[in-house]
């Protein structure tokens, strides 16, 4: 309809328009079409209700062209292109204004621009199309192609981006594109972007042509800077990635174009003079003062010079020209003080960390990293360039891990850098980030799951597409490491020779420098596997190759991995090989190098040093220290390896000595069993099978038994016997109190930190999901490694609660909850229970009348102790609930019920009845009481552990209903659950429905929050006020008497702020009645942060509480609850 009306078919009648829309819906041209026909004399139609179908565009075009003359085909296709572009622009405008745009608009750009590109300019600019609502000209078409090229890059399609950029250039007049002011800036942008993408794609010939065009036509050196930059990169790539050629080229450009003279190999005297000039400029101010200087403008001469200096500084690192890096850094800082802060300075400062690390000045390198972070915060996301992606890579790979920053903390950053760099056309930075991501995954000891598999496959495929054979080989090697750890490491000699030949074939295709880098990474990965599987022959071969490689490496994680396994392999070979002195020397040199780091603040090096010390000394005490350090840092692989080596040591002592054979064997079984489970948790199932095949007793060993045996020693056995005797004595002393006091409470007095392996001594706990591994069942269930964040001595129950909130002060206890006493009371009367509570708790129960208080009072009376109740959310005073959810915990001996005909021995039915009999006069009713789902392993706020089901935290959504009456009178029986809005206030249901629909989507509801949020902001504790309204509807409730003035507002949301729902209803009604301006309402909803709005800017009062009801709370297993 949009296409035909916009192209002149306005003489159609209403019936023809209706038949056309119906036919288009049948054919799939629209996914949805909610429309209103115009008047006979009107040509305007609101098209925002039409939703096009993605994969049916061509089909719809053919359908529409069926009855159109051949001469009108081009016109119709161009009309479709115009409609798609118009719709995409409209959605972009809506998104920029803060509206929620549910459909993807990218495909509209792709299809629309492809349709335009299929026609010559004469056809596009014909008189038949000039009447379109979009202005069509050469610049507009070029900009649209430039936009689609950017979208192609974001999706990783370099060839498509090149095609669209070339098309954009073709739209501009060749004679005027470089001479006319109208076309110059756009022409320069298109050529620079095309030049960068062709270089990233590996098309050096096309890149050279683009460089020549820009250098010959650009008007100033500032406009030529991208060509200069790319020219230097091309010089490096064309000479086997030899950075020295790039350094020479960069120095020549700086000298000839900008008169910046720098020596290629500066002496110490030249460096000292540059430092002296900088100190004079600094004038006793701290270097951090540089981050507060004024920013220079884009394309300012100093900005261009700093960009070329940043490239020069980075190229000096692989060329090992560290003196020039130092000179460039101090020259750049001096220029910054003199002429302003450039956005390229962080690149230079980050690169300066390389020579500082070489001089073991780790604190100075970290301070420069902090300065880089400060400048990044100053620049913001808008002023960052592609060079800053490389800077952030250096920051996370080479600087931040020097202090209290673990490698795993940067894992997500490296993957984000990979995606962003690909989108920007920086393929080298992208694959460097991907490579460091892979090594970080190995070094951090994270589980070898399918997540890693998918990413390695993705890295390898993308490197192959962009013709990066070196990175393809590295990612293939990483995939082999994972496969070997999961499958079987041992292979026949013929298979090993085949793999060696394949590696030699891959290396032969690479250049000299790339071959050396890939060979180093190959050897690191193979040494890693050899240490894990105990392959001494492979260790010797890999150490011979890596022995000549310098210890220093730009990515700290790769340096750490190489030094760790070089040191471990050296100390292991020193025990077995005849070259003991040689390998001891290598291992001790590794330890000496690692000790240069600040061990008090670097948590990445300390566990490695403890592991190396343990393997060198080969004593149980050292192994235990290393195991504890690895456990604290969650290094599963090293923790497993230390357990295995310690167990092998005890096993060797058992065979070589006739004394205490039983003790040595038991300790060996304990440590080896613990290593088995750790390898299993790591995902090294090939290692698990190898250990089971080597040690037959491991197949029958449970995790709990191995854990206890591993922690045992000859000196601790007597303590264990005393401890178990004490527990038995406690159990015997409390036998008479079995029904009234759970054993776990008594045990908690003696041992507050209860461990899961002791819980079966008291009461059998419910089965924990995921607790059984490798098919082990029964009493020897495997204990999960993640910590337990719940009390295993209790069982959690849940139920629904319905209540009339008229006479209550809300659901939640007022004034904060007092800590529940751990003492149990033997009295059964509520008054006596309350008399034993603290004075504050007693006063709160007597003065406040809340739903939660009544529930806790009933449970306290039933179980003769304080029982804590947790609800899914709080409701205000006077608000009702029909499907509120709560949970509470009971001890095991409290869950037994009397067996009757109706009850088979479970407590659910009996407890539900007893609670309803004790609750206040039927105003509160408990229903659907059941046992909560078992605890599961998950990550909450960055902590991985075993968590019990929680009525508040596991909630997925809530349904609120607000009932109103807009008639002249209302049924008096409805006065406690409905708000009467007089019809004289002019409430139009249709307008109210339209205003309510604006709430849908994700918004900042700071203007609709209650007093609680404002108090929290005054105290400095900020609370997130962004919430998502999934659906909101105005429903007319049908009554038997035919009255049509009763309505219900259904609101389905993920969570609500204090008084948020009531404020939403009250504000919407005020806007509907004209008491509040609609534009002001939209600003409060869509732009509160931009306009600095708070609750005080919303003059509407919240709707009365009696009309609101919490209908239900949703959970993942809502069909069972």
Image: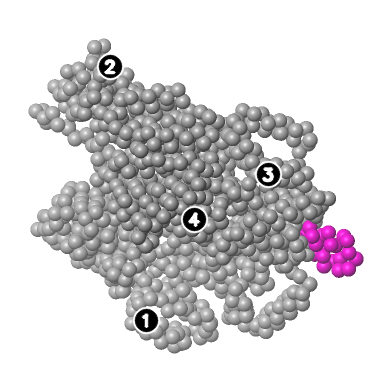
- Residue 540 appears left or right of 208: right
Task: Find the distance from the CA under tag 2 to the CA under tag 3.
Answer: 63 Å
The tag earlier along the polypeptide, 3 or 1, is: 3
Residue displayed at 33% across by 29% down? 190
648 magenta-colored: yes
Q: Nearer the viewer, mark 2 or mark 1?
A: 2
- From the viewer's perspective, is residue 566 above or below residue 434? below
Label of residue 365 in the image: 4
Chief secondary structure of the magenta portion? helix
Question: Which comes sooner in the sequence, label 2 or label 1?
Answer: 2
* Crowd band around label 2 with a 10 angstrom C-alpha radius: few (<14), some (14–19), many (20+): few
Determine which residue is flagged by label 2.
Answer: 120
Q: Can you see residue 410?
A: no
Point out the stretch of residues depicted in magenta.
646-666
Residue that extends furthest to the front in the rendered view of this protein: 269
Q: Position of residue 749 (x, y in %)?
A: 59, 81
Numbered tag placed on residue 34 in the rendering = none
Earlier sequence position, callout 2 versus callout 3:
2
Q: Position of residue 1019 (x, y in %)?
A: 31, 71
Cα–Cα span, label 3 and label 1 = 75 Å
Q: Position of residue 916 (x, y in %)?
A: 42, 72
Q: Mark 4 and mark 1: span between their CA atoms?
A: 57 Å
Sequence order check, earlier mark of 4 and 3: 4
- Pointer 2 and pointer 1: residues touching (CB < 8 Å)? no
Residue at image point 42% right, 63% down? 952
Q: Which mark is residue 548?
A: 3
Quick one: SS at disc 2?
loop
**Residue of label 1:** 844
User: Hey, which quadrant is residue 742 in on the image?
Assistant: bottom right
Residue 745 percent coordinates (x, y): 58, 78
In-front residue for pair 593/616: 593
- Marks 2 and 4, how far apart in space? 58 Å
């Amino acid at each position: 309809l949009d296409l035909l009306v916009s192209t002149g078919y306005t003489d159609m009648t209403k019936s023809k328009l209706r038949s056309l829309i119906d036919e288009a819906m049948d054919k799939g041209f629209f996914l949805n079409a909610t429309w209103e026909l115009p008047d006979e004399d009107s040509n305007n139609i609101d098209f925002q209700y039409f939703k096009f179908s993605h994969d049916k565009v061509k089909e719809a075009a053919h359908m529409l062209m069926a009855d159109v003359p051949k001469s009108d085909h081009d016109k119709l296709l161009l009309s479709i292109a115009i409609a798609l572009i118009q719709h995409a622009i409209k959605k972009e405008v809506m998104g920029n204004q803060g509206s929620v745009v549910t459909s993807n608009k990218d495909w509209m750009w792709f299809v629309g621009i492809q349709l335009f590109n299929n026609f010559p300019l004469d056809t596009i600019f014909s008189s038949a199309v000039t009447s379109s609502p979009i202005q069509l000209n050469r610049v507009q078409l070029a900009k649209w192609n430039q936009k689609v090229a950017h979208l192609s890059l974001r999706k990783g399609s370099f060839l498509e981006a090149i095609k669209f950029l070339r098309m954009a250039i073709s739209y501009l007049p060749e004679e005027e594109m470089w001479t006319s002011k109208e076309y110059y800036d756009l022409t320069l942008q298109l050529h620079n972007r095309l030049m960068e993408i062709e270089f990233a794609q590996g098309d050096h010939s096309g890149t050279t042509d683009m460089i020549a065009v820009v250098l010959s036509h650009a008007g100033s050196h500032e406009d030529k800077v991208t060509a200069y930059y790319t020219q230097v990169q091309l010089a490096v790539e064309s000479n086997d990635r030899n950075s020295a050629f790039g350094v020479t080229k960069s120095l020549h450009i700086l000298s000839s174009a900008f008169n910046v003279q720098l020596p290629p190999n500066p002496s110490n005297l030249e460096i000292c003079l540059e430092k002296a000039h900088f100190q004079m400029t600094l004038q006793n101010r701290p270097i951090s003062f540089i981050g507060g200087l004024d920013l220079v403008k884009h394309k300012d001469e100093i900005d261009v010079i700093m960009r070329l200096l940043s490239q020069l500084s980075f190229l000096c690192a692989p060329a090992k020209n560290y003196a020039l890096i130092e000179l460039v850094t101090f020259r750049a800082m001096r220029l910054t003080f003199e002429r302003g802060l450039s956005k390229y300075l962080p690149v230079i400062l980050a690169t300066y960390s390389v020579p500082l690390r070489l001089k073991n000045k780790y604190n100075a390198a970290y301070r420069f990293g902090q300065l880089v972070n400060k400048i990044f915060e100053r620049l913001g996301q808008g002023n960052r360039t592609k060079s800053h992606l490389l800077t952030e890579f250096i920051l996370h790979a080479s600087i931040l891990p020097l202090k209290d920053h673990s490698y795993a903390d940067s894992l997500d950053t490296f993957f984000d850098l990979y995606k962003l760099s690909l989108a920007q056309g920086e393929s080298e930075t992208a694959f460097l980030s991907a490579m460091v991501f892979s090594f970080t995954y190995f070094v951090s000891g994270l589980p070898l799951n399918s997540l890693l598999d998918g990413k390695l496959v993705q890295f390898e495929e993308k490197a192959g597409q962009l013709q990066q054979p070196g990175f393809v080989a590295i990612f293939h090697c990483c995939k082999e490491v994972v496969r070997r750890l999961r499958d079987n490491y041992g292979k026949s000699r013929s298979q090993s020779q085949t793999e060696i030949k394949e590696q030699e074939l891959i290396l032969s295709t690479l250049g000299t420098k790339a071959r050396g880098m890939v060979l180093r990474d190959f050897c690191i990965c193979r040494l890693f596997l050899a240490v894990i599987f105990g392959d001494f022959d492979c260790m010797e071969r890999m150490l011979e190759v890596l022995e000549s490689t310098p210890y220093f490496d730009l990515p700290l994680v790769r340096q750490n991995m190489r030094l760790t396994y070089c040191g471990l392999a050296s100390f292991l070979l020193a025990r077995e090989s005849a070259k003991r002195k040689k390998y001891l020397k290598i291992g001790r040199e590794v330890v000496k190098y690692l000790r240069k780091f600040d061990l008090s603040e670097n948590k990445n090096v300390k566990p490695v040093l403890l592991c190396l010390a343990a393997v060198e000394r080969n004593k149980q005490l050292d192994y235990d220290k290393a195991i504890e350090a690895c456990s604290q840092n969650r290094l599963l692989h090293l923790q497993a390896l230390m357990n295995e080596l310690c167990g092998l040591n005890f096993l060797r002592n058992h065979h070589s000595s006739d004394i205490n054979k039983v003790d040595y064997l038991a300790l060996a079984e304990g440590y080896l069993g613990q290593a088995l489970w750790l390898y299993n948790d790591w995902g090294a199932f090939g290692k698990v099978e190898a250990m089971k095949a080597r040690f037959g007793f491991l197949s029958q060993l449970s995790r709990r038994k191995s854990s206890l045996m591993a922690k045992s020693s000859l000196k601790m056995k007597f303590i264990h016997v005393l401890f178990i005797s004490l527990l038995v004595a406690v159990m015997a002393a409390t036998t008479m109190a079995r029904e009234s006091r759970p054993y776990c409470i008594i045990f908690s007095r003696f041992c507050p930190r209860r461990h899961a392996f002791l819980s079966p001594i008291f009461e059998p706990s419910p089965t924990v999901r995921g607790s059984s591994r490798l098919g082990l069942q029964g009493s020897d269930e495997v204990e999960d490694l993640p910590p337990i964040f719940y009390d295993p001595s209790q069982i959690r129950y849940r139920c629904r609660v319905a209540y009339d909130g008229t006479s209550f002060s809300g659901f939640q206890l007022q004034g904060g909850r007092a800590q529940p006493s751990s003492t149990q009371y033997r009295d059964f009367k509520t008054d006596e229970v309350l008399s034993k509570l603290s004075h504050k708790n007693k006063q709160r129960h007597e003065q406040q009348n809340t739903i939660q208080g009544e529930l806790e009072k009933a449970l306290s009376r039933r179980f003769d102790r304080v029982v804590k109740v947790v609800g899914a959310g709080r409701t205000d005073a006077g608000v009702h609930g029909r499907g509120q959810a709560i949970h509470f915990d009971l001890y095991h001996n409290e869950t037994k019920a009397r067996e009757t005909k109706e009850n088979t021995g479970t407590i659910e039915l009996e407890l539900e009845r007893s609670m309803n009999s004790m609750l206040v006069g039927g105003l509160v009713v408990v229903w659907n009481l059941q046992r909560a789902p078992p605890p599961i392993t998950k990550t909450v706020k960055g902590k991985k552990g075993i968590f019990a089901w929680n009525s508040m935290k596991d909630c997925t959504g809530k349904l609120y209903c607000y009932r109103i009456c807009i008639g002249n009178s209302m049924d008096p029986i409805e006065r406690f659950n409905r708000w009467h809005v007089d019809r004289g206030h002019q409430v139009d249901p249709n307008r109210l429905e339209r205003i309510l629909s604006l709430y849908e989507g994700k918004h900042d509801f700071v203007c609709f929050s209650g007093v609680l949020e404002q108090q929290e902001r005054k105290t400095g504790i900020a609370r997130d006020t962004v919430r998502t309204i999934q659906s909101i509807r105005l429903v007319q409730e049908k009554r038997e008497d035919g009255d049509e003035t009763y309505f219900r507002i259904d609101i389905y949301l993920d969570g609500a702020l204090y008084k948020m729902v009531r404020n939403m209803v009250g504000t919407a009604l005020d806007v509907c009645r004209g008491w509040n301006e609609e534009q002001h309402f939209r600003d409060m909803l869509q732009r509160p942060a931009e306009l600095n709005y708070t609750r005080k800017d919303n003059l509407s009062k919240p709707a009365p509480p009696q009309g609101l009801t919490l209908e239900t709370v949703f959970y993942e297993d809502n069909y069972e609850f």
